[in-house]
Image (spheres, helix red, strand yellow):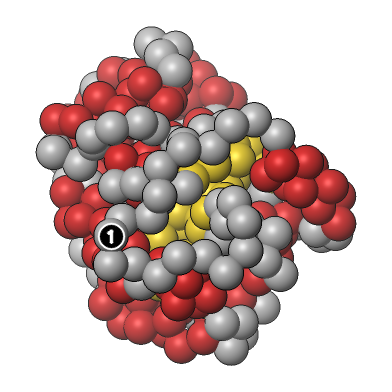
Amino acid sequence: MQRTPWAMRRAVSSIALAVVVCSACGALTGRSPPSGERTPGRPAALIAVGSFDFPESVLLADIYGGALAARGYPVRILPNLGSREIVDPALMSGLIELVPEYAGSAVEFVSLGRVPATSDVAATSRTLARLVARQRLVVGRPAAAQDANAIVVTAVTAARYHLRSVADLAGVAPRLVFGGPPECPGRAYCLPGLKRLYGVRFREFVPLDAGGPLTLQALEAGNVDVALLFSTDPSIVARHLVVLADDRGLQPAENVIPLLRGDVVARFGARLVAVLNAVSARLDTGSLRALDARVELAGQDPRRVAGSWLRSHGLAAGKGATR
C-alpha cells in the first residue's frame, strides 16, 4: 500500500528525454562544490534530485536537494517524475542522481517482492543497502519520519470501543466495516496480515482509494468504521483521527531514506552524504505531517515550505536549488 502504485509497469524511457532537457535548461546555482571536494570530471555536473508524483515526495526532494544546494552543490530538483516504477529505474540508469525513498517499499521494489521488509528500520535499511549495492547505489541515514500504512478510526469510534491499538480490534471487528485500497484483500500488510497477526476479521470490506479523499470521506461519514491511511496524512491531525498502534509490527518500516548514485559520492566526496544525513537526523513523522499540511491543506509552495524548515534547523544558507 504505497502512494506510488505498484501495478504500473511503465518504461523509464518515457522520462528520459524530459530529464535530459530539464538538466540542460535554466541556470545553475552558479556556485562551485565545497572546498576540498572533488571537482566534477564533466562540465555542469548537476545532482538531479527526483521525486515521485505526490506532494510529500516533491516536498522531500526540495528538502534534501535544498540542503545540498545550501552547501554549494549544483542541484536541480525534478519533481513529479512519476511512480516508483519510473523513478527508481531512472536513478539506477543514471538519469537522476538522488531520490528520497521510503525504506520498506524500496526493499520490495528492488527485490521484485522476493525480500519482505520488516518493521525494524535498522534491519530494513541494511537490507536496502545490500540490495541497491548491485546497482551501484548507496543509502543515507534513514530519518525518524516515516510514511507507513496506518490503521485509523475516528475519535468517536476509538472511545466507543476503547481502541488504542490494532490488537484492540480483534474483539469488535466482526461488527465493524473496514475501508481501504481495492487490492487490500490480497496484500500481506492489509486484510490478510490483520487476520494472521492480529486475528482481526471485519464484518465487511469496502474498496476505496489508497488513503485518499474517498477513504477519508467514507470514514467521516460513518460508511466505514476503520480505514487504512498513511501515517503522515495531515488529515489525521486536522480531523482528529486516531491511529491505532501497530504493536505487533505488521507494517514495514517506511522511513524516509536518501537513495543516491555511488558515482555522485565518488565525485563530490563523503561530505555530500553527511549533508543528507544531517537532514534525516532532524526529520520526524510529526514534523513531516505538519509540513505536508502546509503544502496539501494550506496550498503553500513546497519549495518555500522546505526552505523554511531548512532555515529553522540551520541547514539553509545561500542560494537554493534550481528547477
Q: Nearer the viewer, residue 71 or 32?
A: 32
Would residue 144 be visible to someone looking at this image? Answer: no
Q: At x 20% / y 41%, what residue is drawn? A: 315
Please provide percent x and percent y for residue 186.
Answer: 65, 63
The residue that mark 1 highlights is: 35
Q: Residue furthest top?
A: 298
Q: How far from the left and from the top, in percent, is residue 173?
A: 38, 48
Residue at horizontal 70 percent and vertical 59 percent from the top: 95
Question: In the image, is residue 280 above or below residue 139?
Answer: above
Q: Secondary structure at mark 1?
A: loop
How many residues crowd mark 1 within 10 Å: few (<14), some (14–19), many (20+)?
few
Residue depicted at 34% across the width and 67% down the height: 37
Q: Say if 74 sits above or below 258 in the image.
A: above
Position in image of residue 231 (x %, y %): 34, 43
Residue 123 image position (x, y, % from top left): 31, 82
* Residue type at tag 1: Ser
Q: Quadrant of residue 87?
A: bottom right
Query: Does residue 92 appear anywhere in the picture?
Result: yes
Name the quadrant of the N terminus: bottom right
Examine the image and state in which quarter residue 316 appears: top left
User: How many numbered marks appear?
Assistant: 1
Which residue is at the front of the view, 82 or 307? 307
Vertical side of 90 occupied by 25: above or below: above
Q: Residue at x 71, y 69 (%)?
A: 93
30 sits left or right of 51 in the view: left
Quadrant of the snapshot with the C terminus: top right
